[in-house]
Amino acid sequence: ETGVTQTPRHLVMGMTNKKSLKCEQHLGHNAMYWYKQSAKKPLELMFVYSLEERVENNSVPSRFSPECPNSSHLFLHLHTLQPEDSALYLCASSQGSYPATNEKLFFGSGTQLSVL
Amino acid sequence: KQEVTQIPAALSVPEGENLVLNCSFTDSAIYNLQWFRQDPGKGLTSLLLIQSSQREQTSGRLNASLDKSSGRSTLYIAASQPGDSATYLCAVMESWGKLQFGAGTQVVVTP
């Protein structure tokens, strides 16, 4: 158990649905991240929040909308997704504020998303 | 643009053999290099972090080396066990704290 919890573990949605992924960290960390892991591809950084402010938006389509209401919670709101958005979405946190140049990241178990 | 390559993409070894996993990167201007383990359908677990000024890090049966000038890192796992079966990912920390990941090496240790 890494102290980072993601829900749901699995999600199947149609292209017209709206859904949200949730991440919660119990580590008192200051930075939280969303990563996308597609089959056979390296992890891609999507968003970074540091001290509840978005500091990175890595050219992610607007159909993905992050929200960080407080330092312990991070959401990824999904709408009008495409089948190629099917992937494992991973949340992570690190202790210091971003950029955390010499700190370990702690990952959740991910949400496996399938878009039909 | 930083590129991280892991070779081989997959390997299978009998229990007890030592594992050698390779990682190469194209831009040596990094803050650190990290090795992670990922079990199927799960998140990543941090194994070792080597700062750019260091040459190696050790934790139990794991040893990772870093040669920044040649853009290479090697993860050694001694006396492999079936429980070591997983995908191993390396990542380099670039400026501004961005982690750039390789695609991983899938390891199977057979009893």
Image (tube, rainbow, N blue to C red):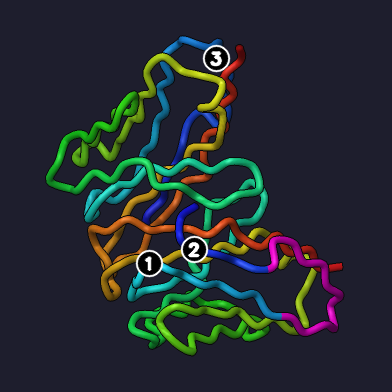
- The residue lying toward the viewer, choosing from A91 and B75, is A91
Give the residue drawn at x 24%, y 54%: B30
Q: CA distance from mark 3 to mark 2?
A: 32 Å
Which image quadrant for residue B95?
Answer: bottom left
Q: Is residue A63 above or below residue A28?
A: below
Residue A71 sits inside the magenta stretch: no
Q: Which residues are magenta?
A: A8-19
- Asked whether the residues under the numbered discs 1 and 2 touch, taking CB atoms below 8 Å apart as contact, a structural biologist would say yes
Residue at 24% over, 44% down = B50
User: In the displayed structure, does residue A80 sit left or right of residue A42?
Assistant: right
- Separation (CA) of disc 3 from disc 1: 37 Å
Mark on residue B43? none
Q: Residue at x 40, y 81 (%)?
A: A71
Where is B68 relative to A15, above or below? above
Residue B13 tag number? 3
**Which residue position is annotated with label 1?**
A27
**What is the chain letter for disc 2?**
A
Is A9 within the magenta? yes
